[in-house]
């Protein structure tokens, strides 16, 4: 009960200092009931630690040990237990299941409820980036305890999906049947695994005779050619699970007069960050930052489709690499389109209004992103209404984990579920920008919302 009272107190405190658009759902997802106890722990433990004892390290060091002057995995283990070897991790994990107390288990439970919507980092006056703290905490937590092997699977889901895309029908046959669903639920603790696209991106681009991505040739383009070219980055979720959306995006940009170049797929590392594999994430971020920097040097706009991945380059990469001044900007689709309004097709007749349910991370990090879609649609002549919602409840892997299913469904029904129309005609006018959001609607409502770019492409076809 004390935690619950503190939770409601924080909701009231946060709401009082926030702009008017801070609705109930956002307050609920931004409230962090364990913060008060964390700060108490910081005061208690921090007094006995050295200067390099950072926030998350303080939180996880409930019982500080004598100083050990060594550096491992990028951390200075002063006054801390060094990362445990496998036998010690196994023993600690057994003790955990026996019920041996460790305050870090309480923090783990609190962090496990974080949906990584980023409302805390941008819309809350305190500006505490809980998803970033969660990743740091998980990295340290699992130096003491064994991970569920599901974490390794999800952390590398981008690479696994790229492998599976070579034989999508085969993998769908293996995973999309009642027996497989039962086995996946029992042994992996996952529900509703996504379906791979039968039409691969490679096939679709070949049909369109898309130009090969050759950096040497791109560097020799004239200024006029650069101004009529774009680089469209792939992401694992749309490329392998929604390839038609990527192809529609390609077609729209081509329709607007651009030559679209698509580099080969590379994993962003976002799932690794979510699960606290920060060393692996840092390695991927360093590699990708060099590649994206080289793309930026070509002087051609770089665009991405999936908000959670595009904003990873803008947020998590910058934080882990400390490269804010030099890292090139990867644009969201609407950020690019809003600068190209004169190229957009114009609808001559009156259209019915469409309704946009935005991705929560997109709304919190790119604050004008939803209004930019509205401006783009207005330039085309299509009314677009922005629907005020909180998180859809899927949040990447969160909604697929068995233990989170009921909470995920409850969050969806509390916000998104209230705005889903019943008639098929109205559902066709419901738009969503996030892959997780569209997947959540699909599993609870039985239909897949369109992405805004698909509507623009279809109207462009009708005009042509």
Image (tube, rainbow, N blue to C red):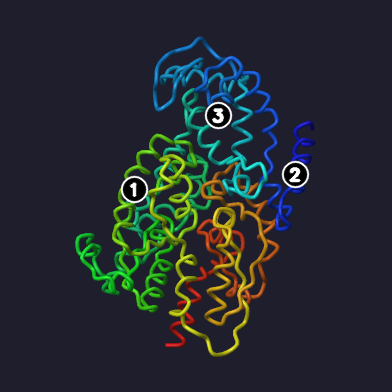
Question: According to the image, label 2 marks what residue?
Answer: 11
Q: Please tell me which residue is depicted at 44% across the width and 35% down the height of the picture.
A: 149
Residue at image point 73% right, 57% down: 20
Secondary structure at badge 2 equals: helix
Q: Quadrant of residue 356?
A: bottom right
Q: How many numbered marks does the figure carry?
A: 3
Q: Earlier in the sequence, mark 1 or mark 2?
A: 2
Q: What numbered label is drawn on residue 334? A: none
Tag 1, which secondary structure? helix
* 10 Å crowding of disc 1: few (<14), some (14-19), many (20+): some
Write down the residue under mark 1: 288
* Disc on the earlier residue, 3 or 2: 2
Percent coordinates x, y for residue 30 in the rendering = 66, 45
* Residue 440 left/right relative to 418: left
Pointer 3 residue: 56
Quadrant for the C terminus, please: bottom left
43 or 115: nearer the viewer: 43
Q: Quadrant of the N terminus?
A: top right
Asked whether the beta carbons under mark 3 and mark 2 sit within 8 Å of each other, the answer is: no
User: Residue 196 placed where, x, y %?
Assistant: 41, 59
Residue 359 placement (x, y as % from top left): 57, 58
Q: Mark 3: few, some, or many residues within 10 Å (few <14, many ≥20)?
A: some
SS of the residue at dot 3? helix
Separation (CA) of disc 1 from disc 2: 39 Å
Q: Residues within 10 Å of mark 2 (few under 14, many from 20)?
A: many
Q: Is residue 254 above or below residue 238?
A: below
Q: CA distance from mark 3 to mark 2?
A: 23 Å
Relative horizontal placement of residue 19, taking residue 408 as reference (left or right): right
Q: CA distance from mark 1 to mark 3?
A: 26 Å
Camera-side residue: 307 or 447? 307
Percent coordinates x, y for residue 33 in the rendering:
70, 36
């Amino acid at each position: 009960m004390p935690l619950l009272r503190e939770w409601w107190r924080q909701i009231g405190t946060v709401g009082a200092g926030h702009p008017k658009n801070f609705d109930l759902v956002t307050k609920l997802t931004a409230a962090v009931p364990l913060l008060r106890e964390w700060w108490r722990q910081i005061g208690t433990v921090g007094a006995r630690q050295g200067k390099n004892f950072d926030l998350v390290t303080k939180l996880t060091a409930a019982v500080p040990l004598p100083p050990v002057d060594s550096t491992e995995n990028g951390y200075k283990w002063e006054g801390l237990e060094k990362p445990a070897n496998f036998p010690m991790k196994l023993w600690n994990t057994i003790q955990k299941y026996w019920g041996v107390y460790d305050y870090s288990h309480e923090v783990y439970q609190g962090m496990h409820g974080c949906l990584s919507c980023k409302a805390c980092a941008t819309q809350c006056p305190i500006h505490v980036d809980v998803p970033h703290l969660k990743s740091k905490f998980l990295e340290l937590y699992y130096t003491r305890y064994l991970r569920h092997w599901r974490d390794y699977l999800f952390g590398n889901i981008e690479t696994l999906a790229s492998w599976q895309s070579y034989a999508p029908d085969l993998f769908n046959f293996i995973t999309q049947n009642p027996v497989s669903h039962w086995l996946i639920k029992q042994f992996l603790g996952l529900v509703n695994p996504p379906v791979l696209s039968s039409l691969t991106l490679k096939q679709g681009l070949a049909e369109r005779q898309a130009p090969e991505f050759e950096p040497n040739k791109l560097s020799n383009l004239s200024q006029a050619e650069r101004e009529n070219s774009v680089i469209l980055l792939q992401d694992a979720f749309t490329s392998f699970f929604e390839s038609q959306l990527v192809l529609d995006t390609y077609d729209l940009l081509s329709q607007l007069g651009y030559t679209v170049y698509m580099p080969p797929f590379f994993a962003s590392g976002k799932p690794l960050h979510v699960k606290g594999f920060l060393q692996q994430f840092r390695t991927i971020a360093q590699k990708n930052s060099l590649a994206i920097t080289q793309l930026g040097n070509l002087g051609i706009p770089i665009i991405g489709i999936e908000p959670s991945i595009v904003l990873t380059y803008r947020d998590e990469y910058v934080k882990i690499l400390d490269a804010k001044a030099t890292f090139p900007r990867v644009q969201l689709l609407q950020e690019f389109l809003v600068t190209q309004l004169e190229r957009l097709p114009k609808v001559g007749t009156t259209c019915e209004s469409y309704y946009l349910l935005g991705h929560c991370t997109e709304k919190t990090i790119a604050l004008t992103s939803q209004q930019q879609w509205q401006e783009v649609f207005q330039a085309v002549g299509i009314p677009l209404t922005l629907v005020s919602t909180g998180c859809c409840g899927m949040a990447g892997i969160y909604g697929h984990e068995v233990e989170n299913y009921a909470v995920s469904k409850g969050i969806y029904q509390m916000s998104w579920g209230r705005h889903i129309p019943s008639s098929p005609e109205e559902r066709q006018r419901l738009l969503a920008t996030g892959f997780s959001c569209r997947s959540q609607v699909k599993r609870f409502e039985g239909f897949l919302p369109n992405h805004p770019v698909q509507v623009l492409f279809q109207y462009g076809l009708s005009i042509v």
